[in-house]
Amino acid sequence: MIILYIVGNAGTSGVAKNVSIGVNDFKGIKALVVAEKITLVVVGPEDPLVNGVHDFFLNDAELKNVSVIGPEKAAAALEGSKEFAKEFMMRHAIPTAAYQSFTSENLQEGHAFLETLQPPYVLKADGLAAGKGVLILQDLDEAKAELKAMLLDSKFGDASATVVIEEFLDGIELSCFVLTDGSNYKILPTAKDYKRIGEGDTGLNTGGMGAISPVPFADDILMQKIEQQIVKPTVEGLKKDNLPYKGFIFIGLIKVGDKPKVIEYNVRMGDPETEVVMPRIKNDLVDLLVATAEGKLDEIDLEIDQRAATTVMAVSGGYPEAYEKGKEITGIDSIADSLVFHAGTKLSDGKVVTNGGRVIAITSYGKDFREALQKSYQNMEKLHFEGMYYRKDLGFDL
């Protein structure tokens, strides 16, 4: 089996071949797929999905028989447009926060809508903004100023040409992952991630500082509600709306009282939750993906490791703002009884060096999340690079 990664990192280079092609360079991807006789493509990032990479394969005579894991462009709008996702949820009676959408043409109506809400105020750029397009603000005047900055001053570029304002939901968050072949689905292990850079969930949002699976408060009763009220209506809604979907659905949830509500959809696996979800799946991942591509997911019995898994992310100093790259990473070889996932790394003159804000994740198993976290932290202490930082309080709210 030949495995290729676009673009890859120092970790993937040890198990596969890294290929330097842009994720939106569809012609370059085609040339690679044809040359290497690739039969299965798994799309990781949201950008190429929103830009229609699956449709590109389907509409190309040389590629149409290659299996692609990831929704077609129309369905990828679940992540590509907050407004589209909200309309989808309302149409299919999927519980979510009340909302309204605004553009530069009705800015004053947006200000008036903010005045009807109680703080905190939630503003979301409609389009993709690399995880940075959501603002939660306590002050009404600040919320009005930020709405103006998003709509008139293009604070998030084209992503904030439309802004969704929604009611703030007070509760505790979790993520539910679903794999669907368009008709059948499997609910994967739940996870809870920690987005803020600072301990106690303070400071700026990041791509994720760590995650825990399973979520301790996601008991059988809550999971039944999530499946019946959210997962099934989502999969059935995609089918009813003729939105072809073969791949992963990441459902960001919040538990308000005893009720689950949807915060957002992602049309792929999310990071760092992937690093705790995938290690708990005992099935061969390729078997699951092939069954998904062939519409035979109902023939698979999903096997889940009952142990807890936790991941802790080491990031570059200064992240999520300005940070330096090229810092040598040492101690990787001394890590034992844990999984090491590379993120922002690369090989340079035979050494592993930093190449991004989020650098390396360490995942461990345990009888519960506390034991698993202890192992992850013990191994994180063996890792070193200049400016390295990680949160030491994951699970504090559980």
Image (cartoon, helix red, strand yellow):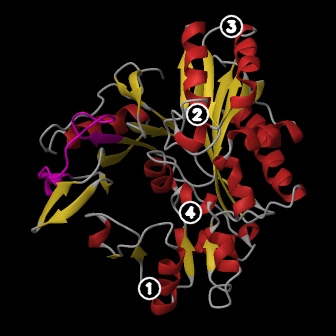
Query: CA–CA distance between discs 1 and 2?
Result: 35 Å
Q: Of the residues under marks 3 and 1, which one precedes in the sequence?
A: 1
Q: Secondary structure at mark 1?
A: loop
Q: Which three-letter amino acid code belongs to the residue tagged 2? A: Leu
Residue indicated by mark 2 = 174
Q: Amino acid at mark 3?
A: Gln
- Front of the two marks 3 and 1: 3
> Image check: 330 left or right of 286?
left
Counting residues from the start of the chain, the first of labels 1 and 2 encountered is 1
| Numbered-mark total | 4
In the rendered structure, does residue 48 fall within the stretch colored magenta? no
Question: From which residue to which does the magenta span run?
Answer: 312-335
Spatial CA distance of label 3 from label 1 is 56 Å
Tell me, yes or no, whether the two marked residues, 1 and 4, touch with CB atoms within 8 Å. no
Q: Earlier in the sequence, mark 2 or mark 3?
A: 3
- Disc nearer the start of the sequence (2/4): 4
Q: Is 321 one of the magenta-colored residues?
A: yes
Q: Which mark is residue 48?
A: 4
Where's the N terminus, which quadrant?
bottom left
Amino acid on which disc 4 is placed: Pro
* Residue 218 in sight in this render: no
The picture places residue 186, in percent across and down from the top left corner, at 69, 56
Q: Position of residue 373 (x, y in %)?
A: 34, 36
Residue bearing the label numbered 3: 118
Q: Which numbered marker is on residue 1?
A: 1
Q: Where does the image place residue 52, in percent across and percent down from the top left?
A: 65, 66
Q: CA distance from mark 2 to mark 4?
A: 26 Å
